[in-house]
Amino acid sequence: MGFGLRVVSATLVSRMFCCIWQRMFVTSSYDRQIGEAVRVLADGGVVAFPTDTVYGLGADIGNQRAVDRVYEVKGRPKDSPLPVLISDISHITDVVDDPDPFALHLAELCWPGGLTLVLPTTVPLHPSLIQDGCVGVRVPDDPICLRLIERFGGPVTGTSANRSGHPPAVNVKQVKQQLGEMVDYILDAGDAQRKTPSTIVRVVKGNVEVLREGVVPTPAIMDTWDNYRAAAQPS
C-alpha cells in the first residue's frame, strides 16, 4: 500500500538529501532572519521565504487583512484560494476538522514534501482560503521554512511568491523582480530546493482527483489510491 509513492519519495530523498543536510546545518545561521520574519507575520505583514519547492508568500491565516494583502501582492483573484502551510501532520486539525483517512495516509507517505491536499473543512477560516468547502494544506520539507512556521506558532499561507500568471520565484532576485517593495520582509536563504511546485490532490467523499501535477507524479497518487481501496475490501 503506497508502494509507488514510497519509490517516488525514496528517489526524491536521494536527490535532495545533500541539499537538505546543508540547509539543516546552516539553519541556525538564519535565526535572526527567521525571528524578524516571525515578528513581521505577527504584526500582520507578508513575508517571502524559501520552501522545498519555490519561494512562498506567508501571512497569518487568522488575520483577515494579512491574507487580503497576499492577494494584493500577487494580483490574484479572490476566487482562487490560497494554500496553507503547517509545521507537522499533527497540526492538520488546525485547518481540517475531520481529515479523510486516505488523505491522512497520503500525508503520512508524502509529508513533509511536495504534496498539497485539498480537503473538506468546517473550521472557521478566512473565506478566501476556502473553495467549495475545501482548504488546501501541506507540510513543506525545508528546515528553514518549518522553523519559521514553528516559531510563528500557527499555519501560514503558502502560495508561490510571484505575480499571478508569472513563473514562481526560486530566489530572492526573482522575488524582488516580480513583487518589488510590496513584500514586507524577504527571508533570504539562497535558491529554493526545487523549481517544481507541489502536486495538488483533492480528496472528497471517496473521490480522489489530481488538480495539478508537480513534485509527486499523478500515477503514484492513483496507484496508491487503487492499492488503498483494494486493501480496504473485505477478504
Image (spheres, helix red, strand yellow):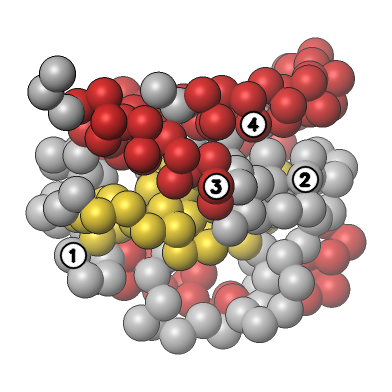
Q: Residue at x 19, y 49 (%)?
A: 206
Q: Position of residue 225 (x, y in %)?
A: 36, 40
Residue denoted by label 3? 219
Residue 60 % position (x, y): 40, 52
- Residue annotated with mark 4: 8
Point out the tag, 2 or 3, that comes first from the N-terminus. 2
- State which mark lies toward you, 3 or 4: 3
Query: What residue is shown with label 1?
Result: 133
> How many neighbours does mark 1 have within 10 angstroms: few (below 14), some (14-19), or many (20 or more)?
some
Labels 1 and 4: the sequence-earlier one: 4
The reply to whether residue 101 is visible in this rendering is: yes
Looking at the picture, which amino acid does disc 4 mark?
Val
Q: Is residue 43 above or below residue 6?
A: below
Dot 4 surroundings within 10 Å: few (below 14), some, or many (20 or more)? some
Q: Which residue is mark 2?
A: 194
Whichever of callouts 1 and 2 sits on the residue coming sooner in the sequence is 1
State yes or no: discs 3 and 1 in contact (Cβ < 8 Å): no
Pinpoint residue 43: horizontal percent, then vertical percent: 45, 52
Q: Is residue 159 left or right of residue 91?
A: right
Q: Quadrant of the C terminus?
A: top left
Q: Is residue 169 above or below residue 163?
A: above
SS label for mark 1: loop
Pinpoint residue 7: horizontal percent, then vertical percent. Answer: 63, 25
